[in-house]
Amino acid sequence: MIKDTSGQDTVLVPSTSKRLKLPLIIGGCALLVSALVWASLGTDSVSKSLSRSDITTAKLFVGTLTRDVATTGKIVAANAPILYSTEEGTVTLLSNPGDTVNKGDVVAKLDSPRLTNQLAQAKSVLAGMESALERAKLDARRDQLQAYQTLDIATVDLEAADRESRRGEELIQSQLIGQIDYEKGKDDLHKAKLKFKHAEQEVALTKDTLTFEIKNKALEVERQTLAVRELERQVDALNIIAPVNGIIGNWITEQKTRLSANQPILTVVDLSAYEAELAVPESYADDLGLGMEVELSFGSIKLMGKLSSISPEVRNREVTARVQFDQSDSLTLRQNQRISARVLLEHRPNVLMVKRGAFMTSGGGNVAYQIEGDLASRREVKLGSTSLSQVEVLDGGKAGDEWVISSVDPFNHAEQVRIH
């Protein structure tokens, strides 16, 4: 019988380290899987990272929002009237550009033969009317005299007829005259009374008629006098006078030019007061209002003024505005001197705002990324008024928040981006 090898076998007891090896391997594999899963989840939520040097950030703060618009302009005389021709004629310029003139000085003359001739004719007509009025007064006196003569004769005839009538009554009682003669005396008295009555009425009518005719003639003379005065005024207006104290600005026409009525001749510049004329972009036209404060810069000197007028017309995509300001004795101003200005459209305290940046346009004005540690989170925001350097935050942030104010295009609409 062949013996087996069981007698040569040795029983081995496994060590503790070998017993723990398998569980450790299993646990390590589990941890590795968990790490891979976590990494996968993390990659889904933070899908992009950017360098902090590639973005610009700013913190939100509460302050006074000054909404303004920067522009340029020039100094102009507050009062620089343009003088126009009053009639058609040939102009003679009596003052040169730069000459000092006083109010009331004749600076140009117009030669209008037509108007001068009209005045001479009107004066001649007036003289004829005045002569006719005096003649009418003489005729009125003559007609009144004739009417009174008729009245006086009628009075005498009435007295004589009355006397004859009374004598006839005495004679008829004594039967010295017949009845026919008596009645004839009564008829003569009645006729005399009628003539006297008509003579009185004729005197009154003649007086009223002559008064009316003289009044009518006088009105014609007065009307012609007014016409002569108007023509005299027009002839006097051929002398173009300076309306203010100042200097002659520019000749708008040439010497001895024949002008029609209402054509510009020259300008007179009043140097006692200046204004600033600004050219404001058309996009700000609806925001402008009379009385708004304006900061004017004359080199290193700054003055405050107020909008005094706004042109209703747009030219070259700009609106012209005038600014009144208090002049300083230390400030030397010249016509058409260039200046810079800042129109203060709005000035509100206690406004939440942030520095302006490209995020306003790249995000459509309603998206911003808020920095929290090393993450930038997408936020829905609402922006309001803007100034030169700040923009109002109406919703989506609070004071102390840090926002990305550079372009948000690199964020590619991600909800979160890691900043390193």
Image (cartoon, rainbow, N blue to C red):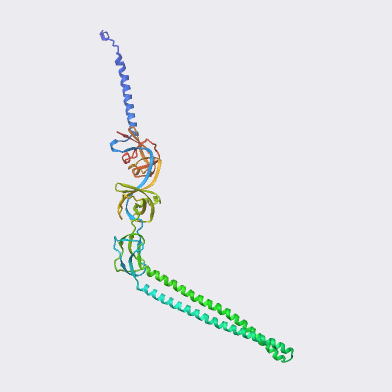
| Picture coordinates of residue 297, whole percent (x, y) | 32, 48
Indicate the quadrant where residue 410 lies. top left
Query: In the image, is residue 57 above or below residue 153?
Result: above
Choose between 255 and 103: the one closer to the eye.
103
Indicate the quadrant where residue 310 lies. bottom left
| Picture coordinates of residue 136, whole percent (x, y) | 49, 79
Choose between 106 and 90: the one closer to the eye.
106
Indicate the quadrant where residue 115 lies. bottom left
Q: Residue at x 39, y 69 (%)?
A: 234
Quadrant location of the C terminus in the rendered image: top left
Q: Residue at x 40, y 70 (%)?
A: 232
Choose between 366 and 337: the one closer to the eye.
337
Residue farthest toward the right in the current orientation of the protein:
174
| Picture coordinates of residue 10, whole percent (x, y) | 27, 9
Choose between 172 and 21: the one closer to the eye.
172
Query: In the image, is residue 28 above or below residue 41?
Result: above
Query: In the image, is residue 245 above or below residue 356?
Result: below
**How many badges with numbers are in the image?**
0
| Picture coordinates of residue 365, whole percent (x, y) | 37, 43
Q: Residue at x 73, y 89 (%)?
A: 172
Quadrant location of the N terminus in the rendered image: top left
Query: In the image, is residue 183 above or below residue 136?
Result: below
